Amino acid sequence: MEIFRDYDLSLHNTFRMKVRCACFVEYDSPDELLSPELETLPKPFKHIGGGANLLFTGDFPGTILHSRINHIKYVDMGLDEVPVIVGAGVVWDEFVEQTCRHGLWGAENLSLIPGEAGAAAVQNIGAYGVEIKDIISGVSCFDNVERKRCKFTAAECGYGYRDSMFKQSGGRYTVLSVLIRLSRKPRPRLEYKGLEGIDASGPMAVRNAVVALRQSKLPDPAETGSVGSYFKNPVVTADVLARVSDAAGGANVPHYILPGGFVKIPAAWLIDSCGLKGSSEGGAAVYERQAVIIINRSGDATPSDILRLEKRVTDTVFSRYGIALEREVEYV
Ligand SMILES: Cc1cc2nc3c(=O)[nH]c(=O)nc-3n(C[C@H](O)[C@H](O)[C@H](O)COP(=O)(O)OP(=O)(O)OC[C@H]3O[C@@H](n4cnc5c(N)ncnc54)[C@H](O)[C@@H]3O)c2cc1C
């Protein structure tokens, strides 16, 4: 375990906010979470992965924890369904790349999503018609209240759209590793727009197509700070959908039909149709190529630039359509 005081977090959040924390801890094994030394460190505690879904709204007065549990264990490569245990600190896309190289199906649509495996299981990451919940068998955790290790089946993780029991628990559980179930048998998932008709001869071919699509649409975190989608896609009733269409002058509003009479409207469309693409506050801007993304355009944007832009977007969308956009990003 390594402990750093008064630590710069700018390389630990993909928005590239220049903020600091009182203390930063990198730990290498679950047992270190029981170390008495941790108890002496400044509170509150917050666990992070790659900081790809976080907005630090200022310096953090407590202790940031980060896992270096970095193993990938293939439990039995001889089976059709291959169980793999992936440590919480493994960079998610390195895991996906490795499993595709081994010819294993299941994770390829989730290629190039920034962040680490532990957070992927907390966030229920999703892309191109697949969510991580579809391939999770179980999650191994440390319970910060009972101070002991525990395990959850996928059903017990309470997964929903970018949501889980872990997110709702207020940081009670630290994810140690995730049990993923992959398949030797081909099972491409190509229903999603953009993937129809691609080369699906193996998981690596599908991964390559997903990577190319993502690179054409999303900012590269190495070059431009962002957290990907800043807002969630609102889920509304058919009546609200009709009201949105009226407010947009009878426009054909894109939407996905959900069970129970609900529809999901892309937040990007709502924002774009309000003419907000490219609008900016200080160094922050609404991304020109995808309006659901707020970027650190100047590289020097401050948390308050981002917050002012967020407010402008939510106020404008609300006054035009009566829809309150919800954040996908988490404030710290
Ligand atoms: C360019 C870009 C594109 C993106 N595209 C997508 C996409 O297609 N789909 C998608 O779903 N997301 C996407 N995201 C969002 C982001 O990649 C995911 O939310 C990702 O899971 C965040 O991982 P992280 O390791 O950075 O977690 P962090 O942002 O560091 O943390 C996220 C949450 O998980 C908690 N956490 C982290 N590690 C642990 C742990 N070990 N135990 C318990 N809790 C923990 C944190 O406390 C926090 O609440 C994108 C982000 C960017 C920057």
Image: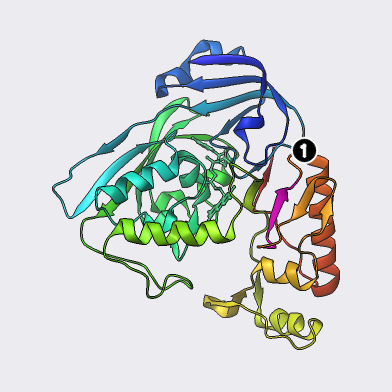
Residue 227 position, x and y percent, is 63, 48
Q: Within the image, what quadrant is residue 179 found in?
A: top left
Tell me: 143 left or right of 54. left
Q: Is residue 3 above or below residue 206?
A: above
Query: Does any portion of residue 122 appear in the rendered image?
Result: yes
Q: Which residue is mark 1?
A: 300
Q: Is residue 195 above or below residue 115?
A: below
Residue positioned 46% across, 64% down in the render: 128
Amino acid carrying label 1: it is: Asp
Residue positioned 24% across, 53% down in the render: 103
SS at mark 1? loop
Residue 8 position, x and y percent, is 67, 23
Quarter placement of the C terminus: top right
Q: Is residue 294 magenta?
A: yes
Tell me: 205 left or right of 162. left
Q: Quadrant of ligand 1?
A: top right
Residue positioned 58% across, 46% down in the render: 168
Camera-side residue of 260 and 208: 208
Query: Does any portion of residue 131 appear in the rendered image?
Result: no
The verdict on label 1 being within 8 Å of ligand 1 is no
Start and end of the magenta stretch? Answer: 290-297
Q: Is residue 80 magenta?
A: no
